[in-house]
Amino acid sequence: MLLQKCLNSYISISEFSYIFIVAFTIDLLLFHRRLRSLIAIELKIGEFEAEYAGKMQLYLAALDEQVKLPDENPSIGIIICKSKDKTYVEYALKKINAPIGVATYQLRNTLPEEMKAMLPEPEEIVKRLRIFEER
């Protein structure tokens, strides 16, 4: 599970409830060093649904209760969907006190020109990944 891989990298898996790991999986779990917060990211292939907010609220409550250290800030949730209706999202999140945001993505066949300079060429990526083959 991706959650287990993330937790094994940064957090002792024994600190996290077995029930939570079996019943739920967070798509991506990161730690933001400057904010000192766990960041739970859910990736969805369709339009935003209100139940995504409830599920994220559950994830954040479990992370804050079972994983977050005392000196860290509350966990943050990000739901990334193919599309969203702004008003629907606002109502879905209105009574939720947890820090949850909703964003959208776009699929493209080519990389935008302004981003090409930010990324290495494919050959450079292959070269950099060879270090893992040598181990």
Image (spheres, rainbow, N blue to C red):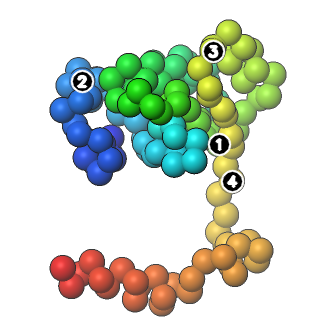
Which mark is nearer the camera, 3 or 1?
3
70 on left or right of 84: left
- First in residue order: circle 3 vs circle 1: 1
- Residue named by callout 4: 106
SS at badge 1: loop
The percent position of residue 48, horizontal first and vertical second, equals: 64, 30
Give the amino acid type for the residue marked by disc 1 in the picture.
Lys
- Residue named by callout 3: 97
The percent position of residue 109, horizontal first and vertical second, equals: 64, 69
Residue at image coords 46%, 45%: 31
The percent position of residue 96, horizontal first and vertical second, equals: 63, 14
User: Quadrant of residue 69 in the image?
Assistant: top left
Rate crowding at label 3 as few (under 14), some (14 to 19) or many (20 or more) other CA atoms within 10 Å.
few
Question: How far separated are the C-alphas under marks 3 and 2?
Answer: 23 Å
- First in residue order: circle 3 vs circle 4: 3
- Residue named by callout 1: 82
Rate crowding at label 1 as few (under 14), some (14 to 19) or many (20 or more) other CA atoms within 10 Å.
some
- First in residue order: circle 2 vs circle 4: 2
Q: Is residue 38 visible?
A: yes
Label of residue 17 in the image:
2
Question: How far separated are the C-alphas under marks 2 and 4?
Answer: 35 Å
- First in residue order: circle 1 vs circle 2: 2
Callout 1 touching callout 2 (CB < 8 Å):
no
